[in-house]
Image (cartoon, helix red, strand yellow):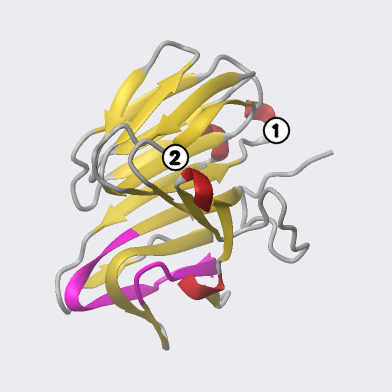
Amino acid sequence: MIEARIQVRRAAERFPGGDAGAGVSTRHAFSFSGFYDPDNVRFGPLSACNEERLEPGAGFAEHAHRDVEIVTWVVEGELTHEDSTGHVEVVRPGDVQWLSAGEGVRHVERNAGAVPLRFLQMWLTPSPSSAGGPPSYGVARSVADGAVCALGRAEAVLHVRRPGPGERVALPGARWLYVHVVRGAVRLAEWTLGEGDSARVEDAAELDAVASGEGAELLLWEMHAESRFP
């Protein structure tokens, strides 16, 4: 039996980014933009998990992507999304948004509301056989506890869990499992993970997380194939 290997990363260990003068504050879990750590580039196909905070009126100007799967989870406030395929949507807490860039797409993400916006944006690299193709977009509204969002191009599945106080959650078995605590706290093996903390688990099998305090909200990435590049 292969024993799971767990690496815990604390919220305070994320490196800062964004532009405070423009009302954008970012905390990066992986190497990103001007920061590079050769030992922290990706985990399986997951290459970014950014915690974004936008003041009212702030946002990211139109920019391009290709061959990346971008998944967004709003924590507080409302996110306005626009892209070159004609989609204009407002994404709220409890919604999950995904943008598959394919052979190329341009998009804008901004806070058009009157209150601060906080969201997570996660990037996954598609497998080489799934590269290219037309871009696609979708939003799942008011996602329930236990719901999943499958990204076929990246061979990954996002699980949303909201355990109550003391509730035990069975984590999915996977070659690569990424656990992010959105709210609350959980116990995972010998570690207690609080808001913003994450765990990178290799060869996950028969692992549980137990919610403490008032419960928790978790995002779990179940990933089965590490992206490979020529």
Q: In the rendered structure, which amino acid carries the disc numbered 1?
A: Pro
- As drawn, is 32 to the left or to the right of 62? right
Q: Circle 1: is it few (<14), some (14-19), or many (20+) Cα within 10 Å?
A: some
Which quadrant holds residue 81?
top left
Q: Residue 149's x, y, as percent?
A: 36, 40
Examine the image and state in which quarter residue 212 appears: bottom left
> Going 64% across and 26% down the picture, which residue do you hit?
66
Residue at the image position 50 percent from the left and 24 percent from the top = 107
**Can residue 21 be seen here?**
yes
In this view, the residue farthest toward the top is 86
Q: Which one is in front, 23 or 91?
A: 23
Magenta highlight on residue 3? no
Q: Indicate which disc, 1 or 2, sits on the residue closer to the N terminus.
A: 2
Q: Which residue is mark 2?
A: 71
Q: Is residue 49 above or below residue 187?
A: above
Q: Percent x, y for residue 99?
A: 46, 29
Q: Residues within 10 Å of mark 2 (few under 14, many from 20)?
A: many
Q: Secondary structure at mark 1?
A: helix
* Residue behind mark 1: 128
Give the magenta range: 194-218
Q: Residue furthest bottom?
A: 190
Q: Is residue 137 left or right of residue 3?
A: left
Image position, residue 33 (x, y; %): 68, 48
Q: Is residue 35 above or below residue 4?
A: above
Name the quadrant of the N terminus: bottom right
Amino acid on which the number 2 mark rests in the picture? Val
Question: Does the CB distance between marks 1 and 2 fall below 8 Å?
Answer: no
Residue pictured at 50% horizontal, 37% vertical? 70
Instruction: Please identify, in this view, whether the residue under mark 1 or under mark 2 is nearer the observer.
Output: 2
Q: What residue is shown at x 50% (from left), y 43% (from top)?
A: 22
